[in-house]
């Protein structure tokens, strides 16, 4: 790996896009290279504060949205019925 600002002739032999990085080289000035994040990211997991989104779903503390439903504390989707005595506030 070489730093682009330390190339001998100032022009890289080859610059390759990463999974989520888009690299473009100016058509007229080969020394100008733009490095940007792609518009559609592909990642395994995203964490922002206490919120995690991954292949299991979306969670924040005890609240989760997964393939099996929505859970928040002791209440789950489908867990509410006429014979239940737990209240929802």
Image: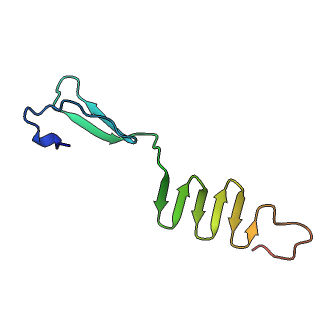
**Outermost residue toward the right in this view:** 83
Tell me how many marks there are.
0
**Outermost residue toward the left in this view:** 8
Q: Residue at x 83, y 66 (%)?
A: 80
Q: Quadrant of the N terminus?
A: top left
Residue 15, image x, y percentages: 25, 34
**Outermost residue toward the top in this view:** 28
Toward which corner of the image does residue 30 lie, by quadrant? Answer: top left
Toward which corner of the image does residue 27 lie, by quadrant? Answer: top left
Query: In the visual, does 55 lie left or right of 45?
Result: right
Q: Residue at x 87, y 76 (%)?
A: 85
Residue 47, image x, y percentages: 47, 60
Q: Residue at x 51, y 67 (%)?
A: 50
Query: In the visual, does 76 lie left or right of 84?
Result: left
Q: Quadrant of the C terminus?
A: bottom right
Q: Residue at x 81, y 75 (%)?
A: 87
Residue 88, image x, y percentages: 77, 73
Query: Closest to the observer: 8 or 49?
Result: 8
Instruction: Give the image's coloring scheme.
Output: rainbow
Query: In the visual, does 17 lie left or right of 33?
Result: right
Residue 61, image x, y percentages: 58, 70
Residue 37 higher or lower than 54, as above or below: above
Toward which corner of the image does residue 72 lie, by quadrant? Answer: bottom right
């Amino acid at each position: 790996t070489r730093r682009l600002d330390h190339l001998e002739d100032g022009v890289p032999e080859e610059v390759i896009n990463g999974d989520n990085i888009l690299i473009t080289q100016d058509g007229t000035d080969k020394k100008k290279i733009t490095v940007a994040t792609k518009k559609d990211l592909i990642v395994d997991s995203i964490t922002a504060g206490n919120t995690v989104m991954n292949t299991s779903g979306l969670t924040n503390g005890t609240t989760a949205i997964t393939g099996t439903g929505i859970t928040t504390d002791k209440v789950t989707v489908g867990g509410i019925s006429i014979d239940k005595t737990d209240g929802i506030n």
